[in-house]
Amino acid sequence: MRIRLRARTRRRNLELGLLLFAIAIGLSSLALVELGSLNRIDGGMVGLVIGLSLLVIVVHLALRVVAPEADPFVIPIATLLNLIGIAEITRIDISRGDVGWDAYGVRQVVWSALAILCALAVLLVVRNHRVLQRYRYVAGFVAIALLGLPFLPLIGLNVNGAQAWIHLGVATFQPGEIAKIALAVFFAGYLVTARDSLSMVGRRVLGITFPRLRDLGPILVVWLLSMAVIVFQHDLGSGLLYFGIFLVMIYVATGRAGWVILGVVLFAGGAFAASRALSYVGGRFDGWLHTFDANLYAQGGGSYQLAQGLFGLADGGLAGTGLGRGSPDITPLAESDFIVASLGEELGLIGLFAILVLYLVFVSRGFHIGFAGQDDFGRLLGVGLSFVIALQVFIVVGGVTRVIPLTGLTTPFLAAGGSSLVANWVIVALLVRLSDSVRAQPRLVIE
């Protein structure tokens, strides 16, 4: 018992040390941004970030009571990414002359505080992750309802051509960000009960077992849902994200590569058809394939944004121009869709790789939490939530660097966007709760 208590104390002390280190880097980044662009440090923004940092410390103190066995790396990594994002968004605000409460950086601090409070509430309310399995169908219904909210009159809102937002008086919100968590809970709960029928029977072709036609219902339903998001909401990135979550979770549940191959073929075929039938999807593909075409570059809604982001990355080179010394504001939506390009310009390839390593460690810890669990629901949920972050980072970075077509998703924790911050901090809370449950559960000892 004493050994276990000492292990808990060491784990929480490690988390505290990493948190303080993350806060120091975040505050240093903000100071460098202001010194580089203003030649002085603005005490107001620094004070807001210090207040946000104290709120994270409160979450840490709460973990010592409600989740003492939790993974010590997840919250510090999320905090560091969040603070780096605030620093770069503040840099873009300064270059545009945005000040006061209307500045994106200030709003990002406010949304971050709200997101962290939501994460704390999840930790206090969800004391055992297995409870979520009972509400899997409720989660599925909630996900569908959230995806339908933007089509309601009065609150539905079209932003940059995507019908994926709702208006809440003083702020806008993207319900699909919360829907991805609800879908992960539903998929985990459903696949636990349907795993045997989806994994044990099928036809073997070229060494790969493919499912029977009668078992294709789940993947076809999720595929149709993803296509509906692309067609009606004009949101290619979210459609890919939802379908990708289901594919990886069904693969983990069944161990059959046939599901993945079939899913990739279905989505690729649907995306190709959408690129021919829907002008906005076709425009994404044209901008990807012909980014530096002069006519497309000058065309409204063409490849200007993507090309400017690539120019910014090239200007940053290996070591970057330095925080506060670049010109990230030249790229449209630099604080949200293209914050990766903004950071790549000022931090360079080295700094961008360091950020990607943080994501890699975060996702690897999430996978470890999932696979270390002894219950199938927790395993699938942990992998699904971690893959949400991994796939979203790939879609965003791949789009900005022209590996895949640009989709318009936000970079987790870094980009400006309140709904994304709330959803991703809730994912952090659920992973922390899962890790505590995994370590606290009794172990079977065979002598």
Image: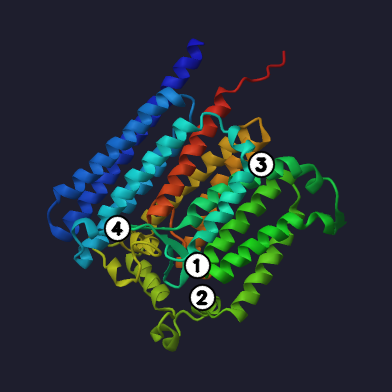
Q: CA distance from mark 2 to mark 3?
A: 35 Å
Q: Is residue 332 above or below residue 194?
A: below
What residue sits right under mark 2 in the picture?
A: 284
Q: Position of residue 241 (x, y in %)?
A: 56, 58
Find disc 1 in the rendering and name its residue. 407
Three-letter residue code for mark 3: Gly
| First reached walking from the N terminus: tag 2 or tag 3 | 3
Relative side of 410 to 215, left or right: left
Residue underneath mark 3? 189
The answer to which of marks 2 and 1 sits earlier in the sequence is 2
Q: Quadrant of residue 208?
A: bottom right
62 relative to 410, above or below:
above
- Could you give the CA–CA distance between mark 2 and mark 4, rounded to whole angstroms? 25 Å
State if disc 3 and disc 4 touch (CB < 8 Å): no
Rendering coords of residue 333 (x, y %): 35, 67
Say what secondary structure mark 2 lies in.
helix
Name the residue type under label 2.
Answer: Arg
Callout 4, which amino acid?
Answer: Ile
Q: Would you call the spot at circle 3 few (<14 residues within 10 Å), some (14-19), or many (20 or more)?
A: many
Nearer the observer, 64 or 445: 64
On-image quarter of the C terminus: top right
Judged left or right of residue 38, residue 351 is right
C-alpha separation, residue under disc 4 versus residue under disc 1: 20 Å
Percent of width and height locating residue 299: 41, 85
Q: CB atoms at circles 2 and 1 under 8 Å apart?
A: yes
Q: Identify the residue at horizontal 46%, vertical 21% (top origin).
A: 8
Label 2 vs label 3, nearer the camera: 3
> Viewer-proximal residue, 254 or 65?
65
Q: Residue at x 42, y 71 (%)?
A: 160
Q: Earlier in the sequence, mark 1 or mark 3?
A: 3
Q: Give the image location of residue 418, x and y in percent.
A: 38, 53
